Amino acid sequence: MPVAEPAAEPSPTGTTPSFPLRAAVVGTGGIVTGSHLPALRELGDRVRLVAAVDTDPARLAAFRDLAGEEVNGYGGLDEMLAAERPALVLLGTPPALHAEQARAALRAGAWVLCEKPLCLSLAEYDTIAAAEGAAEDGPGGPYASVVFQHRYGSGAVHARELLRSGELGRPLVAHCQTTWYRDRAYYAVPWRGRWATEGGGPTMGHGIHQMDLLLHLLGDWTEVRAMAGRLVHDVESEDVSTALVRFADGTMATVVNSVLSPDEVSRIRIDCADATVELTHLYGHSNDDWAYTPAVHRRDDARRTAHWRTPAADVPSSHAAQLDGFLDAMEKGVRPPGSGAEARRTLEFLAALYKSAFTGRPVHAGEIGPDDPYYHAMHGNHPDWAPKEQ
C-alpha cells in the first residue's frame, strides 16, 4: 500500500463519504493519461472515475476510449459538476485555469487534487482557501490539495521521520537541485514561458517539486536571497534561478533550478551532525534513490545506523501514493496532507525567491502581504520582468 503522511486537522462538520468515491478529471492531456488515470486504476476499489472534461472534443474522445465507456464526457466544468456531482475532482489543466476551476469544484462540494502549481499567486491561493468548506453537505471540507508526489512514498516518509526524531543529528547544511533540460520546442506550447498562463519558469513549474520536498523535510524557512536569469530561452519568465535559504532552526541551504542542463538530475542533500542523507533521481524516487552516510563518529555504530537504509516498505513516490493518502483524508473528513498552511508555505517561498531575485535584496517569511506586488504576481510588476504590453 502507498505510504503517506497522516492527515490532520479534523473537520467538525459533515459525514463520512461512501466508497468507492465518484471522481472526475478536468483536462485529458499527458499528465492525466500518464499519471492520474493509472493512479485511479490502481486505487479502483476506493475511487471510480465517472467523468472527464476537456474543451478539445478529439482529445476527450481519445481519453474516453482509453479510460472506458463508463466515463462520461463533458466540454465544460460547470456542466459536469451539475450533472455528475463528483466527490473528487482532479485538475490537470494548464496552470492559469487552476484557481477558477478549484473554486468552482469546491463550491460544488467536491474535494480537489490539483496539479502543481495550484495557482499563480498568493492572492489566488487565498481565494481558494476561502472557498474551502463552502459545501453545505458531504464530508468535512471540501479541501483543495496540490500534487506534490515527491513527498510520498516510503523513502521520503522514512527520511522525514529520521530528521524529525533527531536520529541523524541536527540538520546543518542542505542542497536542493532541479537541473533539467527543455528545448525550444517545449516552449512552443502557447501557455509556457508566460507569466499569465504558467506563472513562472523552472522555479514555478519544475523545481517546485524538490523545493516543496526540502521544506517538507526541514520545516519553516525564514529568509531567502536569490538570483534569476534568462540565459537561453526567449520567454517572459526565467530559465534559471538560484537561492540561499535560512531555515527556522538555523539550517542553511542552496537551491538551483534550471531548464538548461543537459545532464538532468533532481537532488536533495542534507548534512546533519551525525549523518548525510541524499536523494538523487529525476522524476520520481524509490528507496534505492536515498543514501545515508554516517558521520565519522557514528561509523562504528552499525547496529544503530542500519535501519536508516531500510524503511519498512518500498513504495515509490507517485500520484497513486499521494492519492491514497488523499482518499484517507476524505474518508476521515480531515484536511489532506499538502494543503492549507503547509501548501501555502511552499507558494510563499516561491514568491519570496522571485521577489529577492528581482529586487536584489533578502526576503523574509511573512513579509509578502496584500499590499506587496509579489502577493498578486510572481513577477511583482518589476519593469525588467513583468509582461510587456502587446
Image (cartoon, rainbow, N blue to C red):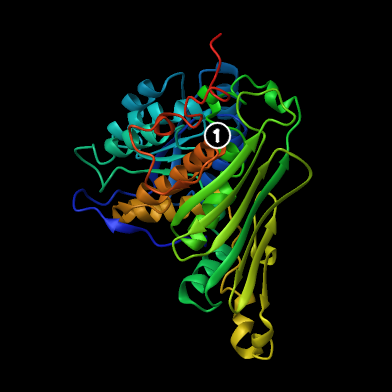
Q: Residue 51: x percent and y percent?
A: 45, 31
Q: Which residue is mark 1?
A: 358
**Which image quadrant is residue 128 in?**
top left
Residue at 21% of width from left, 48% of height from top?
14
Q: Nearer the viewer, residue 366 or 347?
A: 366
Q: Is residue 147 visible?
A: yes
Residue 259's place in the image compared with 15, above or below, is above
- Percent coordinates x, y for residue 265 in the rendering: 73, 50
In the picture, the quarter occupied by the C terminus is top right
User: Residue drawn 51% across and 29% down?
Assistant: 379
Along the viewing direction, whichever of 326 and 149 lies nearer the viewer: 149
Q: Determine the residue located farthest toward the top in the rendered image.
A: 390
Residue nearer the viewer, 341 or 28: 341
Would residue 296 be found to the left or right of residue 146 on screen? right
Position in image of residue 81 (x %, y %): 35, 27
Check the image and name the residue furthest to the right: 262
Residue occupying image coordinates x 57% and y 25%: 385
Q: Amino acid at mark 1?
A: Phe
Q: Quadrant of residue 89?
A: top left
Is residue 12 rendered to the left or right of residue 365? left
Q: Badge 1 local density, few (<14 within 10 Å), some, or many (20+)?
A: many
Q: How many marks?
A: 1
- 12 to 359, vertically: above or below: below
Foreground of the two, 40 or 291: 291
User: Which type of secondary structure does the marked residue at label 1 adopt?
Assistant: helix
Pinpoint residue 252: horizontal percent, then vertical percent: 56, 61
Q: Which residue appears at 45% of the width and 66% of the height?
A: 249
Q: Is residue 320 visible?
A: no
